[in-house]
Amino acid sequence: MTNYNWGIIGLGEIAHQFAAGFQQEQSVLKAVASRSADKAKHFAEAYQIPAYYGSYEELLADETIDVIYISVPNKQHIAHILSALKAGKHVLCEKAITMNSEELLEAVKLAEKKHLILAEAMTIFNMPLYTELKRLIDTGKFGKLKMIQAPFGSYKEPDPKNRFFNPDLAGGALLDIGTYAVSFARWFMTEQPFVAASVMQPFSTGVDEQSVTILQNKKQEMAAVTLSFQSKAPKVGIVSFENAYITIEDYPRADLAKIHFNDGTVETIVSGDTSQALNYEISNMIAAISGDQPNRSLFMTIDTIDLLDQIQQKWAQQ
């Protein structure tokens, strides 16, 4: 059994979650890096990580590191992805993996050239519940997919300087919470949709504060994606078919869904464990690296980033 050594670039909130929950038989969290050596040291000590570096370059130069987890702000993702791939490291990068499809294509081509695995840390593409729901859908007992609802509302303090509203840090709801909603819709749609319509209300800094988007594909499947950074809303995804509809509460890291059949009966599906969401990402990454399974989520990520591009193009025309 091969063991893989991981390193972390970027030590923000999600990196703390990643390190705190890291539990793998084939992987060790071996090193972390920050632009501040003191910050890296404190992080390493907090999670009993053997090595720390005061620069990202030092971490990438560590020949014992096999995989890099990137959790810097969105706008910085592509630079660190390319640097890690050039250094011969596999890469798991936080969402949104890149700012646009052009950046992602460059990264994918480099990963293929270097025979490395590149994946996005998108929980929806890794939670066991979604794999199980896809299996049930494929039996055909729900009938044809008709409509998806993917709302995500989160209240953020309206401070123009924080990352949520700062255009210099790729602020805005779409590239933050919107990646979950669009990924949710794409997971269930049987082929790639296009953006039929999208309207956006900007914050004072110009980034998107809230929006409504309609997705549709050639099979006439439709999805409504509603986002807000100034109003809370329950993260309840709804997937409607001819014979039943599925409800999934707190869908980004869900482990439970309810299937409501047209005759009034309800079936509860439980699969996975919400608390292990980040570990599922790590496990699937290792399975792809070791060749035990294909890098199954990458094409979904490519489709999702393409949809984010289309949405922003619609807004530019308003």
Image (cartoon, helix red, strand yellow):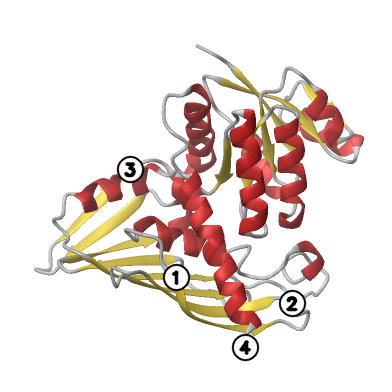
Rendered residue at 43%/40% (across/down): 296
Q: Amino acid at mark 1?
A: Phe
Q: Disc 1 and disc 4: Cα gap in Å?
A: 18 Å
Sequence-earlier tag: 2 or 3? 2
Image side of residue 262 versus residue 232, left or right: left
Q: Which mark is residue 271?
A: 3
Disc nearest the viewer among 4 and 3: 4
Pointer 3: residues within 10 angstroms few (<14), some, or many (20+)? some
Residue bearing the label numbered 1: 194
Sequence-earlier tag: 4 or 3? 3
| Residue 69 drawn above or below residue 270 | above
Expressed as whole percent of the image width and height from the top left, the position of residue 15 reads: 69, 42
Q: Disc 1 and disc 2: Cα gap in Å?
A: 31 Å
Image side of residue 188 versus residue 34, left or right: left
Disc nearest the viewer among 2 and 4: 4
**Considering the numbered disc 1 on the image, is that residue within a helix, a strand or a loop?**
strand
Expressed as whole percent of the image width and height from the top left, the position of residue 205 reads: 78, 79
Q: Disc 2 and disc 3: Cα gap in Å?
A: 37 Å
Task: Please tell me in which quadrant of the rendered image residue 162 appears.
Answer: bottom right
Expressed as whole percent of the image width and height from the top left, the position of residue 22 reads: 59, 31
Sequence-earlier tag: 1 or 4? 1
| Residue 200 drawn above or below residue 189 | below
Q: Amino acid at mark 4?
A: Gln
Residue bearing the label numbered 4: 318
Sequence-earlier tag: 3 or 1? 1
Expressed as whole percent of the image width and height from the top left, the position of residue 7 reads: 71, 30
Residue bearing the label numbered 2: 158
Query: Front-most of 67 and 46?
Result: 67
Query: Front-most of 72 and 254?
Result: 72
Rendered residue at 76%/20% (across/down): 50
Q: Disc 4 and disc 3: Cα gap in Å?
A: 42 Å
**Considering the numbered disc 2 on the image, is that residue within a helix, a strand or a loop?**
loop
